Amino acid sequence: MKIEKITLRHVRVPLVEPFRISNGSVSEKDGIIVSVFADGVTGHGEASPMSGSFYSGETPESTWTSLREELIPRILAGRPESIGDVNAILGDGNPFARAGIETAFWDLQAHKDGVPLYAALGGTRRPVESGLAVGIYPSISELLRAVEKYLVEGYRRLKIKVEPGWDTQPLTEVRKRFGDIPLMVDANCAYTRGHIDHLKSLDEFGLIMIEQPLPRNDLEGHALLQAQIRTPLCLDEGAEDLNAVRKAIALGSCRIINIKIQRLGGLTNAIAVHDLCAEAGVPVWAGTMPELGIGCAQAIHLATLGNFRYPTDVESSLRWFVDDIIDPMIRVTDGMIRIPEGAGSAYRLDPGKIRKFMVREESFAASQTSGSTVH
């Protein structure tokens, strides 16, 4: 393929409410839109770390630096001809930066072939189930009001964030108010092995799963807990790459895996984890950071693969953000997301929204001699 240029646009969109998990709180969402122009078509990807150390060590600033100083020059100099070439050239490193470029090339290739992204990935067009996620609130009454407010869109399950001191009481009240709604919790690594006896008490709430209760690297601890608890454990932060997932399955660390395109560094790695889990009989579901519209659209397409057995974390665009950068925006109807017709992700960038929320922009043009020029 003949790459003409790659453009980065850093956008920042306010959230409709602060999002708090056990690791911290954010009120704005940063995303870096990566656009690859080649062979007369354009593919878009999103590099979407959370600000600060909210989820991982990668930040919007470190991801921008990785893209402009390492990965984009490497891609332009390497002149890839396929998605396989792109992955080989990118190598390891910042997974969010890697995901931004790699997913843009998937979108580009789907546009060149005139096919929807889900077809390029090996999925089939079907509505994707959506699940509601809510953060940690100052009070249980505020939590219950938030759940009631958003459940009207028909979300197919409810996920609440938990941490030590904020688990059994909110779960008790949620069960009282909303009955036998499909319910799960996400701890974002907030507990330790010293909490195993307490975590076992969560069995009484009939949860679909407990997501990432222990530190990300404590696969052995998760195996100890899973052996003593009826509720399935799900790995998120701990499922950081294919090797970690393979080890977790061998140890019995979990019964479910959350697949995040951003955490895994792109769609190719996400498909590899999906296939490994399918072979092992471990169901998966598609998580989000949450990303803005481009990243969420890719997660929707990915979730059409056969081993995605639980509702995705992708929600309506206006659930989290005051606005979104895509047209059409993502909408949930009766708990389902229906993929628009069209090639690639079928969600288009809205130039006006990009200008409204843009923090900075930089373009890298292909060069016959040195690989790239910045202007």
Image: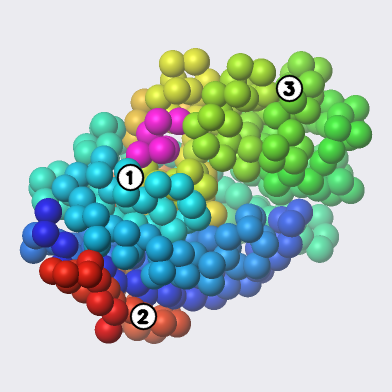
Q: Residues within 10 Å of mark 1 (few under 14, many from 20)?
A: many
Q: Which residue is mark 2?
A: 361
- Judging from the image, what secondary structure is the residue with disc 3 in? helix
Give above or below for 148 relative to 326: above
Query: In this rendering, which labeled residue sits more in front, label 1 or label 2?
Result: 1
Measuring from the top left, give residue 347's x and y in whole percent.
27, 58
Mark 3 or mark 2, which is nearer the start of the sequence?
3
Mark 2 or mark 1, which is nearer the start of the sequence?
1
- Judging from the image, what secondary structure is the residue with disc 2 in? strand
Q: Quadrant of the N terminus?
A: bottom left
Three-letter code, disc 3 = Ala
First to last magenta residue range: 268-273
Measuring from the top left, give residue 273's x and y in whole percent.
45, 30
Whether residue 127 is visible, yes or no, is yes
Q: Residue at x 69, y 40 (%)?
A: 216
Query: Residue 223 — which label?
Result: 3
Q: Residue at x 36, y 43 (%)?
A: 267
Magenta segment, prevailing SS (helix, strand or loop): helix
Three-letter code, disc 2 = Glu
Q: Residue at x 54, y 24 (%)?
A: 246
Q: Which residue is mark 1?
A: 87
